[in-house]
Image (tube, grey):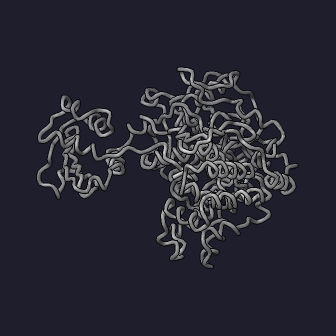
Amino acid sequence: MAGNTGKTQSKSAQPAVSRANDEIVRRYPFDDTRDMDDARRGFMGTAQNSEISTADGRVVWDLEAYGFLAQDCPPTANPSLWRQSRLVADHGLFEVVEGIYQIRGFDLSNMTVVEGERGILVIDPLISAETAAAGLALYRSHRGERPVTGVLYTHSHVDHFGGVKGVVTEEEVAAGVPVIAPEGFLEHAVSENVYAGTAMARRAAYMYGAALPKGPQGQIGAGLGQTTSTGSVGLIPPTLDITRTGQTETVDGIRMVFQLTPGTEAPSELNIHFPDRAALCLAENATHNLHNLLTLRGAEVRDPRVWALYLTEAITLFGDDTDVAFASHHWPTWGSERAMGFLSEQRDLYTYLHDQTLRMINQGMTPLEIAEVMEMPPALEKAWHTHGYYGSVSHNTKAVYQRYMGWFDGNPAHLWEHPPVEASKRYVDFMGGAQEVVRRAHEAFTDGDFRWVVQVVNHVLFADPSHAGARDLQADALEQLGYGSENGTWRNFYLTGALELRQGPVGSPTVTMSPDFLRVLTLDQLFDALSIRVDGPRSWDADITVLWNVNGGEPVTLRLHNGVLTHTAGRGRAVATPDVEVTLDEADLRAVLLGQLSPAELAGLAIVTGDAGKITELLSHLSDPDPDFAIVTP
């Protein structure tokens, strides 16, 4: 890479960062040990082998990778984040109440096991089949070889279903093992990982810091959990949908009352009450941190007002009959009063962010201004579980602004700005050239103004990415911001940016797209996913129509015209005669559209009438996504 100095060594914390981290210790109640007690309560044991591997020996998770967190917090980490990371690094099997157990620390999320009359219900089987299987084996080593008699996905994020094939097979599901999920689960689980999946995976490399070395100067966690496992991601579609709040289901003698919570932490999500055990599973709607209203990897903006309303509803519905509240991340909260206090504070957290951001919007403040002045009430700030280890007050207020107002802050000067490279060239020229900018930025670095350093040196890098001095200084400044960050994902973003500036792109270490996702795409979703890949400018003059007769059902017309790929049921009113007509099985259609089967190979499997070359021509207008696109350089 141009300008790569080959320097990968991390630096020590600058005095300004050390002083700020020391102030954190004085500011917050580190003598409150209730979370430490709760996180260890019910511990039954952990795995004998710390490494979890694929069949061919590739390690996808190491239980002891975060052992360094047992040390005192060093100057290179925010003490509050160090405390949180130490808590989520605890791994093993834990009893929540009699008959409900959690495997924690085996992945980003928790897997919950509920014992029934014959076997067990598995809730949220992690990201990877390997980690889920290891967790299930740990449970069975303590509680016996009970069969899996049900699986439940609380919501549509991959860390809550991707490891399902580590606990149950498709054959067992076909034979009657139910897979339960909230209404809309499959659509959202698939679309999130397909439509913008490449970009999300690339940014997730920054968010979770999977390529960073684990240690006091590297990755220490992500606030919500440690990081993402890198094993086999799968998906078995649900067989039973939860469609309404108050719906009750009994699986293997386990009674459950459901509360649907769509539009909260995920577009499709639910809470579960277990009346026979006075236990409330909160999915990811109430965890021991401030969550994201808009994740740094990218997602749909979440609605904090609706989120808060559902937390209030949970208190109303289940508060009188709940002795323990637990979620698919972090540790439980025991005792009815404590559990409902926890939910009330979580509710107030999202309500306050929503209401105060809107108040300031209506006073004419911009997203950057709101984020800079927003302060949380002292009563909320002193509660550890409201801290921004995963979401942050800063980027959540910007998410509220985006939800209501969009990207534009109303200032016409921001309406038609130059793109980053062109703007940067002009900024650097105005400021006296790259060398002068870097010289003055070094002064700001010495003064501890790292925010300004990364803001101004970014212009030098985008004007001249080969400038070695700018790369080194930017990496050093990003690193210092990481050392001071209380937010795990901010730390990972800063440190991964520094890593890529020093040694080059790390790509996308964790890719959640899997054959299972592609297999459960509806044809509509598959055609939509293809339309996103059309190279519009290169396709302006193309006019290609293909008629697909699939499995003897209603035909589908696929047309590329004006740089747009559209699909319609039937022969399509706008097209008199297709260029080519193909009669084939749905599996073959999926294979050719996904590039797994060439048009030439298709000819031997399908009935083709017309110009078969038009299929090849159509596919030639699709572009491939780039999983390694640049982030900290142009």
Q: In which quarter of the image is residue 600?
A: top left
Is residue 300 shown left or right of residue 502?
Answer: left
The quarter holding residue 16 reads: bottom right
Q: In this view, does 176 lie above or below 260?
A: above
12 or 558: nearer the viewer: 12
Please provide percent x and percent y for residue 379: 79, 62
- Residue situated in front as seen by the camera: 501 or 265: 501
* Residue 76: x %, y % from top left: 77, 45
Q: Is residue 549 above or below residue 317?
A: above
- Residue 156 horizontal/vertical position (percent): 51, 46
Residue 587's place in the image compared with 571, above or below, is above
- In the picture provided, is 481 more to the left or to the right than 423? right
Q: Is residue 403 or residue 406 the one in the foreground? A: 406
Determine if residue 268 is in view: yes
Give left or right: position of 108 versus 402.
right
Q: At 78% from the left edge and 47% from the top edge, which residue is drawn?
A: 13
The x, y position of residue 484, in whole percent, is 75, 52
In this view, the residue farthest toward the bottom is: 363
Residue 94 shows in the view: no
Callout count: 0
